[in-house]
Image (cartoon, grey):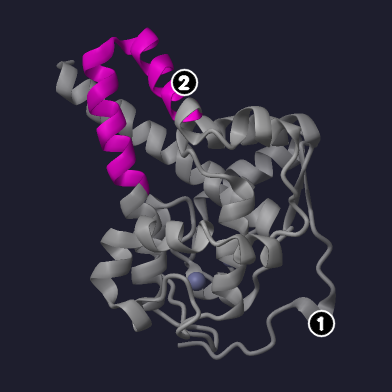
Amino acid sequence: MTTLLTGLVVGFVVAQVGLYITTIYLHRALTHKALTIRPTLSFVFRVLTWMITGIRPRQWVAVHRKHHAFTDTPQDPHSPLIYGYAKVQFGNVVLYRRSAKDPDVVAKYAKDLPRDRWDRVLFDHALVGLALGIGLLVLVFGWQIALVASVVHTALYLLGGGAINAIGHKWGKRPYDNLATNNQWLAWLVAGEGLHNNHHAQATSGKLSLNKGEFDPAWGLISILRVLKQVTLREMKFSQKVSSHTPG
Ligand SMILES: [Zn+2]
Ligand SMILES: [Zn+2]
């Protein structure tokens, strides 16, 4: 395989790992507590988040909870209805950072994730984590493949996140009564997060596919982790389940 092709494949795989970590750890477990991950695996996710995305979990959690609190209103950190499709699709990282850097947002929405000594020593140093991740790619594949893979990973990860927030609030099916949308084709590319209308309808569900014909790829991995007793699901009370289902 040529250097370019290998770099493309490695970059695609690393981006996918990043998207699976984002949906399982940052989104479903930390933000919505739909899942509880055993401490050792949770720490592995924390290290991988640092090395693959450079994201500080408490910031991601805070920005995302604010998105749920003010969905598609002027206070939503990244609504395509407010900012327009292109700004969210391609500038999602800028909008995210604007909100993530606001100490009031983190203080209000991520009280359950205080900065600890691991954050001070390691995880708050995003560039160190990303440098280690890239360094590992250089060691395994050489600098040329690592360079291509890093560029491809960054582009795909950012475009994937942008698509969830932009396409996922603009085009697609709305089986439940909220402004987010379902796109199965997108769900295949972004670890299930394309089923975003379902998610807004039932944010504490560990599984994003709720209806016939839908498939949530990350749910497959979560199911394996449940069998291995690494993950437990939140108990869903009857009243927490979706009640406003209007098939369409
Ligand atoms: Zn949303
Ligand atoms: Zn959410």
Q: Is residue 15 magenta?
A: no
Percent position of residue 125, x then y: 54, 33
Q: Is residue 96 left or right of residue 158?
A: right
Circle nearer the viewer, 2 or 1? 2
For disc 2, the marked residue is 132
Given residues 196 and 248, the one toward you in this image is 196
Q: What percent of the width, then of the height, locates residue 132?
A: 46, 20
What stretch of residues is rendered in magenta?
129-157
Asked if labels 1 and 2 touch by Cβ distance under 8 angstroms, the answer is no
| Crowd around label 1: few <14 · some 14–19 · many ≥20 (10 Å) | few
Residue at image position (56%, 54%) is 60
Image check: 182 left or right of 88? right
Report the front residue among 70 and 16: 70
Cα separation, mark 2 vs mark 1, equals 45 Å
Q: Is residue 186 above or below residue 55?
A: below
Q: Which mark is residue 239?
A: 1
Tell me the chief SS of the magenta region.
helix
Secondary structure of the residue carrying tag 1 is helix
Side of 147 where 239 appears, left or right: right
Residue at 70% in and 38% down: 225
Name the amino acid type tagged 1: Ser
125 vs 154, left or right, is right
Residue in the picture at 41% in, 76% down: 79
Amino acid at dot 2:
Leu
Element type at mark 2? helix
Does any atom of ligand 2 lie closer than 8 Å to the CB of label 2? no
